[in-house]
Amino acid sequence: MQPRTRPREVTVREKIEALHQFLLPWPAIPAEALALKYLCQYFLEERNDLLLAKWIRQDKHMDLDSLFDKALAILTTFKERDAALTALWGQTIAREKRTQLLAEFQHPFQRSILHDLNKLLKKANLAFPYYQELDSFQTDMPSPASYQFYQSVFGRQARPGNAQMWPTFLAKYQQQFGNLDSTTKACLQRLCLGQMHCTDASGKDDMSIFNYITLTRDYGFPLRLDQLPLLAAGSAGNPSSHANGMVGDMLTSSSFLLMQTTQMVWDFIHAFGSKETMMHVQAIHTWYQGTKSPDVEDRANQWAVALSQAHKVQQCQTQPSSGLTINTTASPPSPPYSAAPLLPTHHQYALGLPEKVDLGRRHVTCLYQKFMSLWRMNQYARDIFKDVDFPGHDNIIDMQQFILPLEHAHYLYIMHGTPSKWPLLCPKVYPFLEQLSKQ
């Protein structure tokens, strides 16, 4: 007996639902994907079932299936790379790196997804809702002022026909907010046009409403010009300008920067290898002595409970009138997940070890946070760290295996944090190290 084939309407609808669920909770959704998100919403509304059925019937070559699969694949890759950029570079530098990522993403998405979907809709005599009309994007503009400015320049069309958007936008913006210097213009051009973007009717490079939304999302409206990545624009801008010359000489190619960076990096590496750091790391390893890998998390929880008890003892000693009695042999309270009680008496170490472990946790985490800042500072620093193989794979594993569980336990038992919020509040150095280890 032949298996029953599922109706195509069901299959396509499931693909639309999957794509919509992927796009819906994405706060930093690229502007190019907004039209696709709204299209999914449109066809998932019950009143538009007949229009969806008509569209599918007109799709004789099953192009819709591959288009929605391709869109999901492109967006998934973009989202993963975007998250990795933020973890590795931090918000400020990642914003500039994201501009490059968007430039790679915009061309295949606009040309092979939005353009092709629009063609298929036209074949079925259907309009592409939320693709042509400006009103559709009003809630995606960062402020009413940015929406009103766009409307005053381009009218109510999201895709304003044969108008050259970039020169028109630049002229109108300067007319309203004052002339811009050549460096700022070069930077804006790079942000608005990127490497690949839409073209006007003559085939020349041009910006789009998606570039405008991204620009005003990142830099506000009116644009916060002091926050523009002017250094990145230096190579694309006017090399003879005063700003480019001064910034290029002092910050990107001077031997002074190399000397300063080298000194900071070597001072840091010296501090990392100092006797003080060694003693802190030794205290942490002493606490975990004899602990097998599956029990590391439980042992970290036990440390947090012991530290909490040590704090109470200290308070009792400094405030003898409180009458506080401490039971130092009690098992830890039940955490949000199963954890073993404190280890038997022969595993209890000298008084003060929990406090020493706490100092070690703070010291080593602080060192890695400084490393993260130095690594992100410039290419010189990254090259030096790479040449001396710092911090090294083993040190990163040590950090993730032993110190991250201590941070988690400290958050739960000392700070009394909410378990579900830990992924958001975990120190950013840990996802940074995870991404660095993959480089």
Image (cartoon, helix red, strand yellow):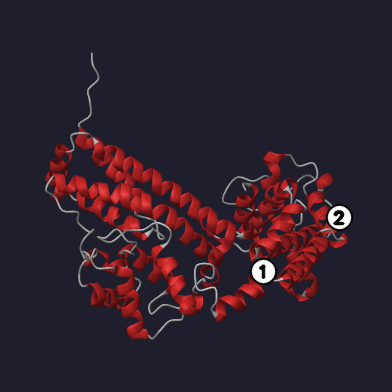
Residue underneath mark 2: 350
Res. 315 image quadrant: bottom right
Residue at x-position 75% and y-position 51%: 389
Does dot 1 land on a helix, a strand or a loop?
Answer: loop
- 422, above or below 175, in the image: above
Quick check: 325 left or right of 171? right
Res. 326 image quadrant: bottom right
Nearest-to-viewer mark from 2 and 1? 1
- 10, above or below 219, in the image: above
Does dot 2 land on a helix, a strand or a loop?
Answer: loop
Q: Residues within 10 Å of mark 1 (few under 14, many from 20)?
A: few
Res. 85 image quadrant: bottom right
The numbered mark at residue 92 is: none
The foreground one among 286 and 379 is 379
The foreground one among 160 and 83 is 160
State the quadrant of the N terminus: top left
Q: Residues within 10 Å of mark 2 (few under 14, many from 20)?
A: few
Quick check: 422 left or right of 376? left
Alpha carbons under labels 2 and 1: distance apart: 54 Å
Residue 252 in the image, given as x and y percentages of width and height:
64, 69
Residue at x-position 42% and y-position 47%: 76
Residue 340 in the image, given as x and y percentages of width and height:
67, 44
- 218, above or below 124, in the image: below
Residue 409 in the image, given as x and y percentages of width and height:
65, 55
Residue 351 in the image, given as x and y percentages of width and height:
84, 58
Residue underneath mark 1: 253
Q: Amino acid at mark 1?
A: Ser
Residue at x-position 39% and y-position 49%: 75
Q: Amino acid at mark 2?
A: Ala
Q: Is residue 268 visible?
A: yes
Q: Which of the two discs, 2 and 1, labels the residue nearer the N terminus?
A: 1
